[in-house]
């Protein structure tokens, strides 16, 4: 007994001595900002005293750089180098000790799986591809410096180039490409990497067997066949990694306009999680999942991976087979106008004339003396510029501006080239009643331009979540395709920077913020509730 007591006392003193040797900062809030090299991440780190150590994985590229943790009352910086760990303590509310570690090691598990994926590409070939990629961005991308200035972006691109010192597979190099595209903060800049990932993993991989549904920083089981993890169960962590940190890491590889997060969350909720998790965290035969049981207590279960083709989910958003444009009278005073797309091809394939439909629809609203119009543009990814402007012309009672400017990297478009740069006429049969617009993270591109015009002119009440497209405009209007010669990765670069003719907003890098934010929770999804439409109807009453 004395020996055991001695061991306990000795262990306690050893732990205390070890803790005293580590740097210490303090915090009153669990949310911590992290600056990783040139990337500032707001509220990306959530203090969890029960996890020891709580490991922050440094962002790629893993190079010599400075990483700073900012709590609400303190900060600490480390000049880090690759393949090291840096430990420190964060004292939360003068009570809880959060043992924190910064890791600059690569995921060795991921390296092993990448080596099996494909033939390795030599470093000099990867560097050639990156130079082609960078030069194409700088030459053609009209909005390359919309959200980050040239100095900032040059540092990011330089740092990515510097770490291309070892052979990689096509898919591993794809991480660098997607990371840069995400850092550009332009949702129209795309690549074929997602298609390559889908093709590879659908044929070869076993993945996480559940589809999570993300709401804010939490995730819930949407689909799966694990008896102890029925739909609606909250997932707390996977293999010791808090679900918020997993989500935040995946977000760094997803494109979006500005600092908008809703579009990225919608992409995860649309079925992308199993493949992206495998891609970033490596091949695993089993997963240790922490979850909350029906009593709210945290339990742990180990589950097996399954083939990608066997991961199915009936709740995932599917292409709507109904008409792309539809007007429905809900009651004597209220109508619902569904605009599921502004895409000319989809509308043409449905044998619908957009202009003719709009004119007849708004004439019907006036004849039927409808006083409340709900316009649903959720999941509308955009399309033709003039369709968005035409829709707004049926809501306005006076001439209005739509685009303030449009320019490529070499040419400023003039009014005579694009009439949408001038004043637009209101329609003679425009709607004069109250307008409610339903939006979400998949409301993008032309849809966001239309919404921005309506918001700037105070013409509608917005319900739902922030649009995936930016309030001030986007970079689109056609694209050029660049193939990287050695990796065969294809990048689509948008050619025209659009600036919307809108009033100044609070945030320069955000979408249209709803007047009434309402996001479906997991129970709403499982029960097929339309909470946004229900709220609009309650507001009308």
Image (cartoon, helix red, strand yellow):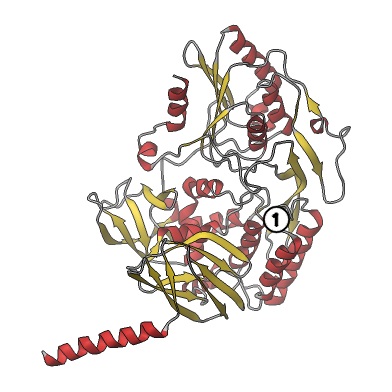
Apparent side of residue 457 relative to residue 223 in the rendered image (left or right) = right
Residue at point 55%, 67% (across, down): 117
The answer to whether residue 441 is visible is yes
Badge 1: residue crowd in 10 Å (few <14, some 14–19, many ≥20): many
As helix, strand or loop, the secondary structure at mark 1 comes to strand
In the current view of this chain or complex, which residue is farthest to the left? 1
Give the camera-side residue of 20 and 298. 20
Give the x, y percent position of residue 465. 51, 39
Q: Quadrant of the C terminus?
A: top left
Q: Nearer the viewer, residue 81 or 10?
A: 10
Q: Is residue 242 above or below residue 24?
A: above
The image quadrant that residue 149 belongs to is: bottom right
Outermost residue toward the top?
367
- Locate the N terminus and report the quarter of the image it occupies: bottom left
Image coordinates of residue 424 in percent, x first then y, are 77, 25
Nearer to me, 206 or 32: 32
Quickly name the residue at label 1.
491
């Amino acid at each position: 007994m004395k020996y055991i007591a001695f061991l306990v006392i000795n262990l306690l003193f050893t732990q205390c001595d070890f803790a005293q040797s580590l740097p210490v900062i303090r915090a009153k809030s669990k949310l911590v900002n992290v600056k990783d090299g040139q990337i500032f991440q707001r509220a990306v780190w959530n203090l969890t005293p029960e996890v020891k150590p709580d490991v922050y994985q440094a962002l790629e590229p893993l190079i010599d750089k400075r990483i700073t943790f900012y709590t609400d009352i303190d900060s600490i910086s480390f000049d880090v180098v690759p393949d090291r760990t840096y430990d420190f303590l964060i004292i939360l509310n003068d009570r809880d000790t959060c043992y924190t570690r910064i890791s600059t090691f690569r995921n060795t598990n991921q390296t092993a799986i990448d080596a099996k994926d494909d033939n390795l590409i030599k470093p000099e070939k990867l560097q050639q591809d990156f130079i082609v990629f960078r030069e194409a961005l700088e030459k053609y991308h009209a909005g390359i410096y919309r959200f980050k200035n040239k100095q900032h972006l040059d540092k990011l691109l330089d740092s990515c180039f510097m770490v291309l010192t070892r052979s990689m597979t096509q898919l591993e190099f794809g991480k660098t490409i997607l990371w840069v595209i995400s850092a550009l903060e332009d949702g129209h800049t795309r690549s074929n990497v997602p298609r390559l990932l889908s093709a590879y993993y659908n044929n070869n991989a076993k993945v996480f067997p559940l589809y999570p549904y993300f709401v804010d920083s939490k995730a819930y089981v949407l689909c799966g066949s694990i008896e102890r993890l029925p739909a609606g169960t909250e997932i707390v962590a996977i293999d010791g990694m808090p679900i918020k940190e997993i989500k935040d890491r995946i977000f760094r590889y997803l494109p979006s306009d500005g600092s908008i997060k809703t579009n990225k969350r919608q992409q995860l909720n649309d079925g992308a999680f199993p493949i992206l998790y495998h891609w970033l965290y490596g091949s695993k035969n089993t997963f240790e999942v922490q979850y909350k049981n029906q009593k709210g207590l945290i339990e742990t279960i180990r589950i097996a991976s399954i083939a990608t083709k066997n991961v199915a989910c009936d709740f995932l958003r599917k292409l709507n087979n109904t008409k792309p444009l539809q007007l429905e009278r809900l009651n004597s005073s209220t109508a619902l106008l569904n605009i599921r797309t502004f895409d000319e091809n989809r509308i043409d394939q449905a044998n619908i004339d957009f202009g003719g439909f709009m004119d007849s629809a708004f004439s019907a609203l006036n004849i039927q003396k409808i006083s409340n119009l709900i316009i649903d543009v959720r999941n509308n990814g955009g399309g033709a510029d003039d369709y968005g402007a035409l829709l707004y012309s049926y809501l306005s009672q006076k001439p209005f501006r739509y685009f303030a400017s449009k320019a490529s990297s070499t040419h400023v478009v003039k009014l005579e080239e694009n009439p949408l740069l001038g004043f637009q006429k209101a329609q003679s049969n425009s709607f004069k009643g109250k307008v409610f617009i339903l939006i979400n993270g998949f409301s993008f591109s032309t849809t966001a331009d239309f919404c921005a015009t309506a918001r700037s002119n105070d013409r509608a009440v917005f319900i739902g979540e922030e649009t995936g497209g930016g309030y001030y405009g986007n970079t689109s209007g056609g694209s050029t395709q660049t193939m990287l010669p050695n990796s065969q990765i294809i990048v689509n670069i948008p050619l025209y920077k659009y600036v919307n003719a809108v009033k100044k907003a609070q945030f320069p890098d955000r979408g249209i913020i709803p007047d009434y934010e309402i996001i479906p929770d997991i129970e709403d999804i499982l029960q097929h509730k339309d909470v946004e439409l229900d709220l609009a109807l309650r507001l009308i009453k």
